[in-house]
Amino acid sequence: MNIKDIASKCNLSVATISRVINNDPKVADSTRKKVLSVIDKYKFVPNITGRSLRTQKSNKILVLLPTMSNQFYSEIIQGIEETAEEKGYAILVAVTNLQEHQEIKYLHMLRMKHVDGCISLFNTIEADAITSLAKNYPFVQCCEPTMTADVSSVEINNRQAVYDVVKQFIDKGHKTIGMISGNYYKTSELGRETGYQDALRDHGIKFDKNLVVKNFYRYEDGAIGAKKLMAYKPRPTAIVCASDSLALGATSYLKSQGLKVGIDVCVMGFDNTSITTYTSPTISSINQPRYDLGKESFKLLYEKLQDINSVNKKIILPYQIIHRESTGSNN
Amino acid sequence: MNIKDIASKCNLSVATISRVINNDPKVADSTRKKVLSVIDKYKFVPNITGRSLRTQKSNKILVLLPTMSNQFYSEIIQGIEETAEEKGYAILVAVTNLQEHQEIKYLHMLRMKHVDGCISLFNTIEADAITSLAKNYPFVQCCEPTMTADVSSVEINNRQAVYDVVKQFIDKGHKTIGMISGNYYKTSELGRETGYQDALRDHGIKFDKNLVVKNFYRYEDGAIGAKKLMAYKPRPTAIVCASDSLALGATSYLKSQGLKVGIDVCVMGFDNTSITTYTSPTISSINQPRYDLGKESFKLLYEKLQDINSVNKKIILPYQIIHRESTGSNN
DNA sequence: CCCTCCTATTTAAACGTTTACATTTATATT
DNA sequence: AATATAAATGTAAACGTTTAAATAGGAGGG
């Protein structure tokens, strides 16, 4: 069943059928009604490949993830998906596992026209490559824009978020505050570390690099980080972590040492993933507006899909600091 | 740059170029070499849409997920992806959020020929619909085959897994064993509950439905379930859960009541997601071979892609019971 | 030198759309 | 009624491939 079959059943040309399908106003109401009824009767659905070939559009966009096993991305994808669907785009999710060759392979889909555009949650390729990619293809970075690359992006103000948290700690009387971070050396991570340093500086506390432990983002690394920090003299009374898994690992180490988390030592996570409420104590965290990060990313991409030469925008969305038991809150 | 351009640069017809691209043996070695060098020189990549239109194949398969926010699916998808790629298939991930209309929408991609086949991790539509779908399109169910549907599937023996766990508990002297399960009433869930009942029966313990609490699969439901079970007289000394999140919730409730998990009460989870090692105590769990579940699913799908009339197979893969602190293990 | 039989290559149709352009039909204007 | 204008519909090319069927070019046999 194709458009030709429908045409012959309607005693019309394929062009008219196509016009009805595409809501072209230049077709008589009576004709339109007849065509629609036949389409409905035979449950005809236009072949997307034929359409793609003719229009040179796939109406698909690629969403590039570093990993599937981070709960954080789930809601971002939902935000992208629902917004994209409204505009007639389907999404295709690919996972790089932080492998550059995988990333390159998937980005190739843009050049091969398998997809019309791409929203990337994490890139390992260098800034120049990103800039040139973004110049030639609809491309948006979400949460983790590549520094110095000229590209549209959506993120939160990571620096300010950690700044606020550290300031709150200081205001509450904490004098020795540690940080457990990662070793990706990417925008969000560096922003968070800068926020930490800036807050200390602005409140008259001297920065000591021994109070910042950098490693991977795994649970274990949180525990290792906490152990190192607890060896510092005087013992830190607050720790801000660059992810929830780090905060969780840190918490577990602190508990194992008989320290009361939220009383003896406060711990702040990052991303507000659901795991923060599954633990004892529950973990305070910085919430990113995940759904909206996805939604705004697609909106930016859509501008590029309409006009590849449209100006690159950098969108910053608000975050929230959520206090739970690990920072002494009881709710 | 299309196949025609390459042809004219080679002074050959498009047919020959196409043959080279598709490794057709009926082309002279010298010609092949020349064509390949030109293709390489211009970095030509065949347009997939043109090919799809002509061959009536998309070389894409759909992977249908109930949710993105379950760590469990991540590795299954990886197994599918890597196996699919070897055969030249790309995967397209879609999320139903357990909404039937979403599921129907995505399954429509099969009929619309957007994808050549589908591996589904969870279906809500009825058995007859699955059977008829599987008869007409390459379709495989992974982990959660629809009962009574005639369809290829891959899963573990859920009944046996729980049977083994309960038997181990009994062998260790436990007399009162509770279960916290879900209320999906799907194959895996019912299998797990049957395993629980059968193990009790086979070892002379009378089944009491008050020792099985059914609710959602959320963390909270684990806590609620544990609370109910702890009210039972005599107090259960072991609990087997239908998921890790339930086990986690149960554990947190037990701890809040001053009970030592792994000593006073043993808790067993299901799926062996990474969270089981992030908690204190660490949670014992039943491991499903996730990567292989994905891999074997694609292999089954591939048989269907080759011949839609090939016989439906049911593959059962092995599981492992992983003991951690929550069942008294100390490693 | 002619014929047969391969092998290598070309030709042209087909896949299912969309759309610029051409044509027909209806309506309005004089 | 004749003409101009607008609206509705039709025609045919184009998108980039693959692949039957046709054809050309040799090699080998007689």
Image: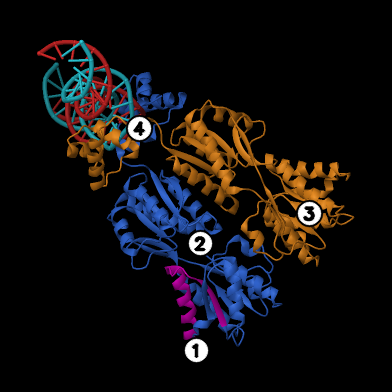
Chain colours: A blue, B orange, C red, D cyan
What's the CA distance linking mark 4 and mark 1?
67 Å
Specify whether B31 is left or right of A219. left
Q: Which mark is residue B239?
A: 3
Q: Which mark is residue A204?
A: 1
SS category of the residue bearing label 3? strand
**Chain of the residue under label 4:** B
Magenta-highlighted residues:
A177-205
Residue at point 24% right, 44% down? Answer: B37
Q: Which residue is mark 2?
A: A289
Residues flagged by tags 2 and 4 on a common chain: no
Q: Residues within 10 Å of mark 2 (few under 14, many from 20)?
A: some
What's the CA distance linking mark 2 and mark 4?
41 Å
Q: Is residue B324 visible?
A: yes
SS category of the residue bearing label 1? loop
Q: Which mark is residue B53?
A: 4
What's the CA distance linking mark 2 and mark 1?
32 Å
Residues flagged by tags 1 and 3 on a common chain: no
Quadrant of image for the N terminus of chain B: top left
Indicate which label's residue lies in the foreground, 1 or 3. Answer: 3
Specify whether A73 is left or right of B235. left
Of residues A293 and B226, the one nearer the viewer is B226
